[in-house]
Amino acid sequence: EVQLVESGGGLVQPGGSLRLSCAASGFTFSDYNIHWVRQPPGKGLVWVSRINSDGATTMYADSVKGRSTISRDNAKNTVYLQMNSLRAEDTAIYYCARGIAGDPVAFDIWGLGTMVTVSS
Amino acid sequence: QSALTQPASVSGSPGQSITISCTGTNSDIGSYYYVSWYHHQLGKAPKLMIYDINKRPSGVSHRFSGSKSGDTASLTISGLQAEDEADYYCCSYAGSSTYVVFGGGTKLTVL
């Protein structure tokens, strides 16, 4: 079965750090770009970051640029999102999603998400 | 405030058709053919319904269709069914700097 499973979320204090993981199975992981998208409580989806299939290029939303790093290990079929200097506004469900080849906004497989809560 | 503007809610009766609009600018929807739509129910993974303005992924019903005119994209659902009730989000490419923008979401209620 083709699937993505997020993990690593939790409660963290403002200024703290978390590393989210996205584990893939059921497809050739190294062929696909992977994105992170988040959903703050009661709000809509917001794109966060993208890494291309071989990990050579990355993109970030302005809201996380300089505080977050996306990376991948194709041998482990896993993408990571390292988040530092966390703020209350980073509180959200974080989803990882697979990008359709050649299309920057078509995400055909999503995980169920992992919840990040930033609070003292 | 989201980059793309969607109505907060729409509703329709079973069997009817509804259209959800998604208004952007000439920096996103107006300049590219990369517009997608997602169906999302609380506690579940979002689902891709339309991509490249009007293409349906395998397995998505023909009742779902997409279009674009100028800076506005639209999702039309015909023959409404109870299982269509969900939040719907539009998404557009916005160039190499901003990259991806979503709409604020539209809650569809099937009466």
Image (spheres, grey):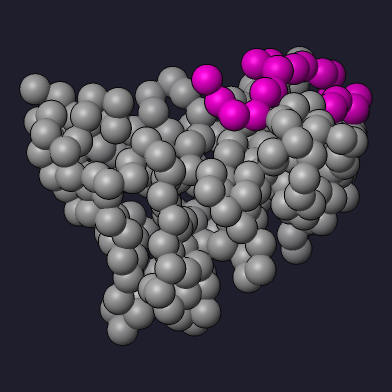
Residue B23 higher or lower than B27, as above or below: above
Q: Is residue A6 left or right of residue A48?
A: left
Q: Quadrant of residue A11?
A: top left
Q: Position of residue A84 (x, y in %)?
A: 18, 44
Closest to the observer, B63 or A81: A81
Q: Residue at horizontal 79%, vertical 52%? A: B33
Residue B83 higher or lower than A88, as above or below: below
Q: Position of residue B100 (x, y in %)?
A: 57, 46
Q: Quadrant of residue A57?
A: bottom left
Magenta region includes residue B18: yes
Residue A93 higher or lower than B58, as above or below: above
Q: Is residue A82 left or right of residue B73?
A: left
Q: Quadrant of residue B8?
A: top right
Q: Which residues are magenta?
A: B1-19
Q: Position of residue A103 (x, y in %)?
A: 66, 62
Magenta region includes residue B40: no
Residue A9 in sight from this viewpoint = yes
Closest to the observer, A47 or B17: A47
Q: Residue at horizontal 41%, vertical 50%? A: A60
